[in-house]
Image: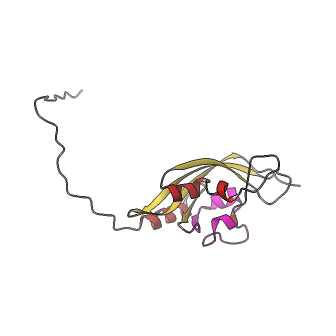
Amino acid sequence: MAHVELSISESLVPQVREPIEPMRVDNFRLWADAAAAALEPCLVIDHELVVVAASRSCRELLGLSEHGSVVGRPLLEELRLVDFTAQRGELDEAEIDKIPPLLALTSGRLARGLLRVANGAHDGESDGTVDAIATPVWIGQKVAGSLTFFSPISTRFPTS
């Protein structure tokens, strides 16, 4: 067990340190490379909402671009989101702006929420619900994109 004594007669003044140099690596590219190779369902979008990287498990979970690569394509063209009502209405622009990958990008803060992803069937039986948590990815003082991890809440059911 260690013994520590603090003196109340000496003022506690933090030591001055040299300023930290900005990172000389491309933080955004590092996260994109990590997401592309990850086993977990995750994706990275840039500030223009274009998919920069998506893990294989993410593409499978969200049904992204089953007939080609999703990388380089706008996320909102690939992802069909519906509301949680029985009518399964498509999300309007105001609701889409609140989905975690976009909210993290626009707010510069962590964002979390549930998404209902449709696969194109109209019966609703093949929809999937995912929990999404997103963080902004910074280059210097600017948000360059977002990194989002997904976790399935309910799985899609096969359609007959």
Q: Above or below — where is 13 with respect to 18?
A: above
At x 61%, y 70%, the residue is 71
> Looking at the rendering, in which quadrant would you find the C terminus?
bottom right
- Give the left or right position of residue 122, taking residue 56 as reference: right
Asked if the magenta segment contains residue 76, the reply would be: yes
> Looking at the rendering, in which quadrant would you find the N terminus?
top left
**Colour mapping used in the image:** secondary structure
Decide which of 107, 134 is in the foreground and name it: 107
Q: Taking the image as drawn, is residue 39 in sight? A: no
Q: Position of residue 3 (x, y in %)?
A: 19, 27
Q: Position of residue 68 (x, y in %)?
A: 69, 72
**Looking at the image, which residue sits at the far left?**
9
- Give the left or right position of residue 68, taking residue 87 as reference: left
Q: Above or below — where is 152 with respect to 138?
A: above
Q: Which residues are magenta?
A: 48-77
Q: Above or below — where is 95 with respect to 48?
A: above
